[in-house]
Amino acid sequence: MGLHSSWFIVFTGLSLGMSWVVRTEQKRKQDCEKHTASFVYSNLRWIVFDEADSILELGFGKAVEDILEHLGSRNGALDQNKNKGEHIRRQNLLLSATLNEKVNRLAKISLKNPVMIGLDDQKKPSGKSNTLGNSHTSLLSDDDEDGILEKQNDILEHAVDDFKLPAQLVQRYVKVSCGSRLAVLLSILKSLFERQISQKVVIFLSTCDSVDFHHAVLSQLEWSSGPQLDMDKKQKFLSCKVFRLHGNMEQDDRKKSFLGFGSEKSAILVSTDVAARGLDFPKVKYIIQYDSPGEASEYVHRVGRTARIGEKGEALLFLQPIELDYLKDLESHGVSLTEYPFQKVLDSFPVNGQKPHKRKIISLDMHPWIMSLQRSLEGFVAGEVMHIFFFLLPQAAVWLILYFALQ
């Protein structure tokens, strides 16, 4: 790995491999430092911590500290190691969607006189101007090293409280009981694509089996809005393409889904959190979190798939009545959601072929549109289960469990 030109190291919580991307595993670290004679870093100019919070969550904090120590790029390094980097001008970059105690510690030991990029103007600490312009503020002054580290630590700890989300991101939630969730999801998707045909939606679910089930429903469900379910008049409920993505898929299938969804102008991607970090899907307009994330910080990564580079975006969070306290957790981090006007969406759909008219406010479960859609879903699931019963008995059992869990 000895190179004659300038080169850089990337620590990443996503990709694993060797060349200019260096693994964070302990064994590979030791191989590079102690057993690889050609590991020459005299021309090292850049060290990048990509998805720093993920690196630390995976347990590689100590390994990263040891590597920084070995390279002479750790603040407070031993004298013999610190001298290694004195003749070189290096720049360290730390990238993270969330700031927490572990990320702050990594910043403290790896960054000197850093510039914070991406904070809202109202949240930025004051500091001297720099060549990056008004949107970037220098955090620290040119004091001695001890003073720099102390100030840096105070500023970063203050920034932990709030999540930083784009101002152009519209965030909403919908409160819906467990039994109506799937019908509500389908209704919202139908409304979105009737309102604007060309748009892309990412739906986050919690498990691989759930992704497979919902992918089948969204891509195969047929339905008729007439008084009777006339087979000749049935058509696809959603006309757009539907892709799926999760960790149990074969690599070729995952690649096909990734490239296919990225190239479409109008499509839906149903995915686990494997798509929440590090993937850049162009022109994604809408993020739906059908299953709420376990940690509030993961909310940031999920909605980060939209409203990128100044583009507008929308995010919708599904919550059951018992989960409404989740909103308070988000509010404690400076994230405020408004309620989605779902009643208006429901009243816009025809029932039994009749045009919509002003209806009395009734419970969601008893709404004519929801009841009609529930009957179609029950027929679809029953038909699919019977179709695969003799071929994939375990899969049939999973589908039955998933469906009745929604009731």
Image: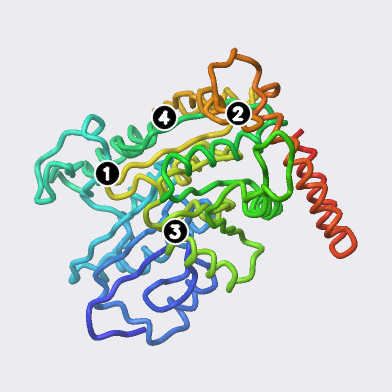
Q: Measure the alpha-carbon separation of dots 2 and 1.
A: 50 Å
Q: Earlier in the sequence, mark 1 or mark 4?
A: 1
Q: Position of residue 171 (x, y in %)?
A: 42, 32
Q: Earlier in the sequence, mark 3 or mark 1?
A: 1
Disc 1 marks which amino acid? Gly
Disc 2 marks which amino acid? Gln
Numbered circle sitting on residue 118: 1
Given this view, does label 3 or label 2 mark the residue nearer the observer? 2
Given this view, does label 2 or label 1 mark the residue nearer the observer? 2
Q: For mark 4, give the secondary structure.
A: loop
Q: For mark 1, give the secondary structure.
A: loop
Q: Measure the alpha-carbon separation of dots 3 and 1.
A: 19 Å
Q: Earlier in the sequence, mark 4 or mark 2?
A: 4
The residue drawn where x is 33% and y is 59% is 74
Given this view, does label 3 or label 1 mark the residue nearer the observer? 3
Q: Which residue is mark 2?
A: 354
Q: Which residue is mark 4?
A: 335
336 or 122: which is nearer to us?
336
Q: Which residue is mark 3?
A: 279
